[in-house]
Image: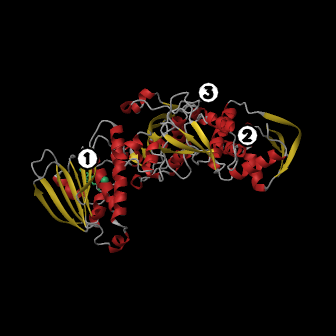
Amino acid sequence: MVERPSSVVKELVENAIDAGSTEIVVELKAGGLQLIRVQDNGEGIEAEDVSLALQRYATSKIRRAEDLFNLHTLGFRGEALPSIASVSQLTLTTRVAHSLSGIKAVCEGGEIKTLAETGCPPGTEVEVRQLFYNVPVKRKFLKSIRSEIHHVLNHFLRLGLAYPNISFRLVHDRRVLHDLVKTESSLVRIEAILGREIYQHLQPIGWEAGEIKISGYASLPSMARANADGIYIYVNQRIIKDRIIHKAIVEAYRHVIPTGKFPVVILSLIVPPSAVDVNVHPTKAEVKFRDPDRVFQAVNGALRSIQEPSAAAADAPSKREDRALPQAETIPFFSSYGPPVPFRFARGRRDETVVPEVREAPPPGWNRERGVPIRIVGQVHGTFLVCEGDQALIFIDQHAAHERILFEKLKKQVEMRSFPVVRLLLPLLMEVTAEESFMLSSCLEEFFSIGFEIDPVGEKTFAIRSSPSGIDGEAAQEMIREILEDLKMVKREEKGTEALNTMLVTMACHGAIRANHPLRKEEMEELMNNLNPFHPSTTCPHGRPIFFSLTWDELSRQFRRKS
Ligand code: ADP
Ligand code: MG
C-alpha cells in the first residue's frame, strides 16, 4: 500500500484534511526518501488515542460498509499510519486545542519506541524519515528524485485543486515549490495551480444528467497539452482514476484538438451512493459505476456542451433529460478578465444561423476588425496559403481547411435532415467481406442519415438504393468501402454519433482540395471566405492543425530587430 514517497504524502495530507485543517505544510528532503514532514493545524489526536492511531485498523472515522462512499472523510480504513510507520522511522507529534501540552510518539519499523508529553502548537505533525530503510528492495526500485517529486506534485496539486479553502505549502530541499494561499474561489486556486496561460483557456462546466451532477472547468479547443496530466477527476470529492470518465473526456475533444493531444479538465462528479458499487476501494482511487454508459454520456455531454452549446444535448435520445445549468448556477468564469474575444475571420456574407456561439480567443493574427480582409499573399508549394493578418503571418493548410469547412457543412446538413440525396433507378448491388458486412449492418441507420439507403439482400450482399448527390455508381461503392475502413477504428461502445462523425470525416476528406493542387486567386479567396469558422476549432476533423501563425514579434526577433 505504501508504494513510494508520493503515497505517503497523499495519505498524510488526506489525514490532515480530514482533521479539519486550514493550513497544511509538506516538507520533503531528497524526493521524500530522506524526509517527509506533514504539518497541520487540525483538531489533533487525544493523548490516549495516539498509540491507537498507530495500530492497524484503528480509525476514528466511523465506518459502515454500505456507507463507505458516503463518508465525508477521505480515510476510513485505519491503515495508513501503521503501514507508513512499519517501513520508516516515524515521529508523530500532536496536540488537541483544549489540552495544555501535546504528545510525541517515536516509532521505528512500526514499533512505538517512546511516547512522551511535549510542548507543541495545536494540530499534528508527522515526520517520516528514511522511508523503506528496512525494505532495501523497494528503495532500490524507486526512480530518481525528480520522478518521485513529479508523483508528489501530482497528488499535492490534485488535493490542492479540490480544497481551495485550505492553504497548502510544499517545500523540497528547502525550496518552496508551491505556496497555495487559501481562498473562497476555486478559480483563484485553479489559476495558482495551472497558471494564467491555461486558466485563460478554461470554460466553466455546469451539467445535470438526471441524478449525476457535473461541475468544473474545461479547456477550449484553442488549447491542448501533450499529456493527460491536466485531467483531474473527482467523484463525490474524491480523487479518482476512472477509465470511463477519462475516455468520455478525451472522446469529447476528438476532432477538435489535434490527435494525441489532451485537454485540461477539472471535473467534479456528484453521484448518489446508489450509483456506485459498494465494494469500491477508495484508497485505490477507483470506483465502479453501476451504469457506466450513463456516466460516459453525462461526462461527454457536459464537455461537448461547452464546445457547441446547442448541439450536445440534442445528440442522443438517452441524453434528453441532460441539460446545461444556467450560467448563474456555475461560477462566471471570465468575469475577472473581461469577456472573451470573439473569434472572427470571415468577411462578406455570414450566415448567422450556422454560426454557433463562439467562445474561443483568437490565435494571434486571426483577430481583426470586422470586414477588413486578411490579405492573401499567395499559395506556396501548391499546398499552403500564406496570408497577412494584422498581428501575424498566417500559414494555412488548404486541404485541412477545406476538410473542416466540408465537415461542418455536412454535419449541418445531417442535423437539418437536408442532406441532398439521389435515388437510384436501379439499386446497385455490392459485395462485401464478412467483417464489412457486420459493420455495415450495424450502421445502416447512420449510412441512411448521410444519404445512403442500403438494404441487406444476402449475407454479404447489399443493395444501394440511394446515395448522396454527387456521389454515384462506382464512387458510391468506393465511398462506402472507405467509410467501412475508417469505421474499423471506431470502438464498438462508441457507435452511433461517433460512427456518423467518422462517416462525415471520410466524406469531407474525400471532397476536400488535395495538397499539391495549385489554386487560382478566386479559389483561394473562396476558401478563405468559407473558413469563417463554423466551429471554434483550429484543426481539421482528423485532428491536424489548419493553420499556424508567426507573429510580427517572432519575425522581428528572427531578424534581431527586437530582443
Ligand atoms: P484513517 O485515516 O483511515 O482513519 P489512518 O491510519 O490514516 O487511518 O489514521 C488513523 C487515525 O489517526 C485517524 O482515524 C485519525 O483519528 C488519526 N489521525 C491521523 N492523522 C491525523 C491528523 N493529521 N490529525 C488528526 N488526527 C489524525
Ligand atoms: Mg488516513
| Residue at screen point 42% across, 27% down | 328
For the rendered model, the colour scheme is secondary structure
Q: In 3D space, how far apart are the residues under numbered discs 2 and 1 (Cα atoms)?
A: 56 Å
Which amino acid is tagged 1? Ala
Camera sees residue 2:
no
Q: Of the residues under marks 1 and 3, which one precedes in the sequence?
A: 1
Pick whichever, 216 or 366, lies toward us.
366
Q: Of the residues under marks 3 and 2, which one precedes in the sequence?
A: 3
Q: Nearer the viewer, mark 3 or mark 2?
A: 3
Pick whichever, 324 or 534, lies toward us.
534
Verify CB contact (< 8 Å) between mark 2 and mark 1.
no
Give the residue pinned by disc 1.
19
Give the secondary structure at mark 1: loop
* x and y percentages locating residue 485 in the rendered image: 72, 53
134 displayed left or right of 442:
left
Pick whichever, 418 or 125, lies toward us.
418
* x and y percentages locating residue 192 in the rendered image: 33, 44
Could you tell me which quadrant the N terminus lies in? bottom left
Give the residue pinned by disc 2.
445
Q: Is residue 502 above or below residue 1?
A: above
Q: In 3D space, how far apart are the residues under numbered discs 1 and 3 (Cα atoms)?
A: 62 Å
Which amino acid is tagged 2? Glu
Whether label 1 lies within 8 Å of ligand 1 gets the answer yes
Give the secondary structure at mark 3: loop
Q: Of the residues under marks 2 and 1, which one precedes in the sequence?
A: 1
Give the residue pinned by disc 3.
348
Give the secondary structure at mark 2: helix
Label 2 crowd bin: few (<14), some (14–19), many (20+), radius 10 Å? some
Which amino acid is tagged 3? Gly
Verify CB contact (< 8 Å) between mark 3 and mark 2.
no
